[in-house]
Amino acid sequence: MAGPNGLLLRCAGRLSTWLAGMAACAVLMPSAPAPAQRYNLEILELPVRYRSITWVRGINNAGDVVGWVSEEGTRNYLPGLWRHGRFIELPLLDNGGGNFHFAGAEGINDRGQVVGFSNGPIWGEYPVFWPDNQTIVNLIDRDGTAQEINDLGVIVGDYAVQTFSYKPFIWWGEGQWESLWPPLDWVNDINNLNQVVGDDGRKAVLWEVGQVTYLPALQPGARSGAGAINDFGQIGGASHKDIAVNHPVVWRNGEVRELPRVLGYPDPYGALFSVNIHGEMGGTNQVAFQTTHPVLWRNNLVVDLNDMTTEPHPEWEFHFSPYINDAGQIAIRATDVVTLKGYAAILHPVDTGLTVWGIDPARPGRRNTIQVNHATPGGRVSLLWGTARGEPQALPQCPGAMIDITDPRLAGTAVAGQDGRAFIRINIPAQTEGNFIVQVVDHRSCEVSPPAWTLIKAEN
């Protein structure tokens, strides 16, 4: 439930070779049910009067999605709510007979209440609240945006303190609100404990009533921003490190940890914008010049959501930030590759498909465990790794199977249990560090898992 934190930066990734002598494999008994692996794609309704979906901005635990749409033949941008896959246009403020409407839905809570912005009779947009589908409330009679709302009805957003200068606010209800500046210069998310995250213009900040916590960056003095927080206080965002580029990070118990990035571009950047109660985190990674893809982090691994549908969908591409709810559903923008028209979509989790789930603890100089789900029971699986993704290439031992890793190397093998799960233990040498791509091959079915990336890095 969060938007970008304003860090518009570029990133330079550093790769190193994963040294040989890694594999000491074993099968462990499972301790918990396997989580969902792949996703079924649902394209949501877009009535013909609308030209395209502009942004998808949030999803609640009922699967309701919010965003903005553009109207055919006009300059209008309008707030949208999709409930049970059907589109509902939300009411607008009176714009005094102006030439166009500029409005959008930015956040939604589990009660179905929506927040966003709508232009009025005076220049600019106003932060607004839709308590239901027929009612709109102007929160603050100033230019600004309401960005997020929690299940208590507490709202955060920004408002104009002077022309082109905006500061964050928190709205408690019944017209009661207060500025969060200082310490916050930008606000991104609020959880159900009324904990707010954002940044002060340079440092990531966690704000609670009566308490302000400055979150550490990957390097002392580096710029950072917090983009999302769940109800367990797990925070995701971005941080600079050695140069001015965004590295995706997670803060747990006040400690920062760098997350892996999807590689494939010389200077990839990444940031995190949503996190659910299970610690699954959605965000974006740069994959080509001026091109970002939505990604999902799971336990020290990251996957490109374009790779994760149960069936190939060559007619659709996913771009921009994904938003994940506690049921694992992901709201996303899907672009028709022929017409370039955008649609709101939901990726519904399905508990199927060979997948690498996580690597723990993803630290050099230690024995690390790779988790594999949905292998053939009793069958052998092999973990392959490399430092770059390339054109798919055939595996000689598995006719028809293709792997996406350039110059793949074997890390280890294991035998899956009767539940289809395998755990491969890998000894990673102490001097190893960098981002790596991994895939698993099931020798009986010849299924290959979607590519995933991990970051092997010493503790900060």
Image (spheres, rainbow, N blue to C red):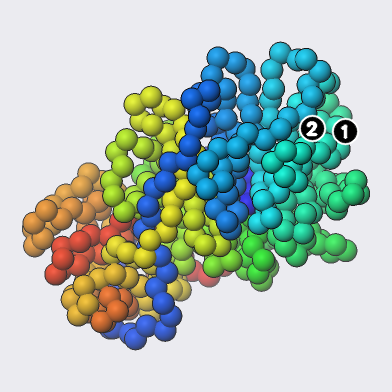
Q: Residue at x 82, y 50 (%)?
A: 170
**Residue 126 quadrant:** top right
Tag shown at residue 126: 2
Could you tell me how many numbered marks the image carries? 2
- The C terminus appears in which quarter of the rendering? bottom right
Q: Is residue 217 left or right of residue 121?
A: left
Amino acid type, label 2: Tyr
Q: Nearer the viewer, residue 358 or 242?
A: 358
Viewer-nearest residue: 46 or 149: 46
Q: Is residue 218 left or right of residue 155?
A: left
Q: Give, as a three-letter code, the residue at label 1.
A: Asp
Which numbered disc flags the more N-terminal residue, 1 or 2?
A: 2
Q: Quadrant of residue 97?
A: top right
In this view, the residue in front, 50 or 293, is: 50
- Label 1 vs label 2: CA separation? 7 Å
Disc 2 residue crowd, few under 14, some 14–19, many 20+, Cα 10 Å = many
* Residue at x 64% of width, y 29% of height: 78
Q: Where 367 sits versus 349, above or below?
A: below
Residue 61 horizontal/vertical position (percent): 58, 58
Q: Are marks 1 and 2 in contact (CB under 8 Å)?
A: yes
* Residue 449 image position (x, y, % from top left): 27, 60
SS of the residue at dot 1?
loop
Q: Give me the residue at 20% from left, 61% from top.
A: 447
Residue at far front of view:
134
Residue 349 lies left or right of residue 273; in this view the side is: left
Q: Is residue 239 visible?
A: no
State the image coordinates of residue 371 (x, y, percent, origin top left). 35, 73
User: Is label 2 in a helix, a strand or a loop?
Assistant: strand
Mark drawn on residue 201: none
Residue in view at x 15 percent, y 55 percent:
401
* 162 is higher (above) or lower (below) than 106: above
Residue that mark 1 sits on: 141
